[in-house]
Image (cartoon, grey):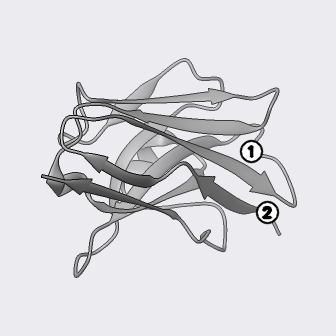
Amino acid sequence: QVQPVESGGGLVQAGGSLRLSCGASGGTFSGYAMGWFRQAPGKEREFVAAITWNGANTYYANSATGRFTISRDNFKNMVYLQMNSLKSEDTAVYYCNSGTSTAALRTGATSMAFWGKGTLVTVSS
């Protein structure tokens, strides 16, 4: 079973930046769209960003547009989320997952049966 492994989270001041990484344990993301999601304390998991299988197109939640950039390196089997101008409301555990399409990911429909442990991002104001 392919399972995502997220890393790169941490504590950062408001206005700062972080780069999250996502790798695959037990398989590959090849051929799949990939997405980042987040879950803040007491809230449901929400879509953040998605990228097509070849990296040609990207999509963002309104909250991420203009501040976050999703990218992927298919040779390394990695997906990244560059987060700039971080705000306290970005505090959450961030997860990645695959999907059959970016449209599916935007609705929360993911391909991998298991979610990773995620990586915690804490933004202090």
Q: Position of residue 48 (x, y in %)?
A: 34, 47
How many tags in the picture?
Answer: 2
Q: x, y percentage for residue 90?
A: 24, 53
Residue identified by numbered label 1: 29
- Residue type pointed to by label 2: Val
Determine the CA span between mark 1 and mark 2.
8 Å
Q: Residue at x 20, y 55 (%)?
A: 124
Q: In the drawing, does residue 97 fall left or right of residue 88? A: right
Q: Nearer the viewer, residue 12 or 106?
A: 12
Assess whether mark 2 and mark 1 are in contact (beta carbons under 8 angstroms).
yes
In the rendered view, tell whether residue 46 sits above or below residue 44. above
Nearest to the observer: residue 35 or residue 86: 86
Residue denoted by label 2:
2
Q: Residues within 10 Å of mark 2 (few under 14, many from 20)?
A: some
Tag 1: amino acid = Phe
Please give the name of the residue rendered at 19% of the width and 35% of the height, measured from the top-left corner. 15
Q: Give the farthest residue toward the bottom.
A: 42
Residue at 31 percent across and 36 percent down: it is: 60
Q: How far across and how far down the image is residue 109, in percent?
A: 48, 61
Q: Position of residue 30 (x, y in %)?
A: 78, 38
Toward the viewer: 98 or 9? Answer: 9
Which of the 4 image quarters holds residue 46?
bottom left
